[in-house]
Image (cartoon, helix red, strand yellow):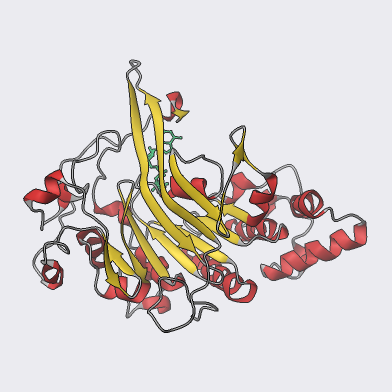
Amino acid sequence: MTATTVPATSAPGTTVPEAPVLEAVDVTKHFAVRSAVGARSVVRAVEGGTLALHRGRVVALVGESGSGKTTLARLLAGFYAPTSGEIRLEGTPVRRRRGRVERGYHRDVQLIFQDPFGSLNPLHRVRHNLERPLRLHHAVRGRAELDRRVRELLERVALTPVEQYVDKFPHELSGGQRQRVVIARALAVEPKVLLGDEPISMLDVSIRLEMLNLLDRLRSEDGLALLYITHDIASARYLCDDIVVMYAGEMVEGGPKEQVIAAPQHPYTRLLVESSPDPGRGARDREALFDADADSLGEPPSLIDPPAGCRFHPRCPFAMDVCRTQAPPRTDLGGGRWARCWLHPEGRAGELDRPGTDAGTDAGPVAEHATDRTTQENQ
Ligand SMILES: Nc1ncnc2c1ncn2[C@@H]1O[C@H](COP(=O)(O)OP(=O)(O)OP(=O)(O)O)[C@@H](O)[C@H]1O
């Protein structure tokens, strides 16, 4: 898998780094929630989120359920305003008026959801679902031109022969075909960035690989910048260039995928990697490619009252006193790699290589998973 450009995270001297297309700079998102008995509290869904997406490259955002991946995607997509921090599109901070980003922003940055059925209008045929964005965002008019553009879009997502799909309703298509239509619709507005929030997780295992290959083609042929959100590190390994690992609302490690996977520099990443299938089986074994799920690793902590210090410390076999009281700083490890773990400043990172120090899946206290979406209000 080759990338067309090399981002700022690449090893020095490889290529002149290209500026990011989309960036989150130290973003935080807090949600105010109210419990059934009326008590108010704050869910610290994302804190200190910093991430850069580059043309023609894929960043995978990996972490277990409730770690803040979707919230970050929604911040990047402009659906949420950050509580603090900044989203930048091509270097320019995104401005909001009356809580909303400009319409043009949604043309440049498209979010693809997990559930392809929920994202298509079930009352309309594929043709209509694709013509709408063409009319709205590109003012395409005239039957012939619309037909040509719709055909082109379906061909790009390999829904051919086009005649077989264009007049179908969403319910007449398989999950994979529907997700292809969703991607075609996203492409209709000619975006610069695609944010895929677990775009394959609801699809049949047999077609997930094809979908990853389609996403890979879009970034290499169209130069799209892609964020691929997933629970499983194995599919991230297959598709992405760089990996960013989230734990309990914070980014704990990032860098080029091969290095992150070969030698994790955070105990949580190590846990994720150790529980993922043998890379040797790789793409040859489709089932194995998707059976490493971060959600099988244990309960994440509450984001209303997260652990003090490093949020991973209750589950960490390396935890020191400092981990229980102070949040670890970000340590730059060179070559685009970084980690937030006290082992680095304390000069103990070598211990991450030693066997027999498993980050237990049931070691820590099982905290309540903070959610009360029925009484929420955005801060
Ligand atoms: N609108 C909201 N109001 C209140 N809390 C929310 C809201 N959206 C998300 N949360 C909370 O924020 C935290 C992060 O959720 P988020 O959905 O971003 O995680 P995730 O990693 O995407 O999880 P999943 O993989 O299950 O989608 C969770 O504790 C969640 O309950």
Instruction: Answer above or below: position of 69 versus 274.
Output: above
- Front residue of 25 and 202: 25
Expressed as whole percent of the image width and height from the top left, the position of residue 355 reads: 10, 71
Which residue is painted at 10% across and 50% down in the image? 322
- Above or below 367: residue 133: below
Q: Which residue, as the protein is rendered here, is positioned at the far bottom?
A: 14
The picture quadrant for ligand 1 comes to top left
- The residue closer to the viewer here, 32 or 180, is 32
Q: Is residue 252 left or right of residue 151?
A: left
As displayed, is residue 267 above or below residue 121?
below
Q: Is residue 362 visible?
A: no
* Residue in view at x 39 percent, y 36 percent: 30
Spot occupied by residue 87 in the image (x, y as percentages of width and height) = 51, 50
Q: Quadrant of residue 60?
A: bottom left
Relative side of 48 to 107, left or right: left
Please name the residue shown 24% across and 39% down the image: 306
Say which quadrant the C terminus sits in: top left
Label total for image: 0
Q: Is residue 211 visible?
A: yes
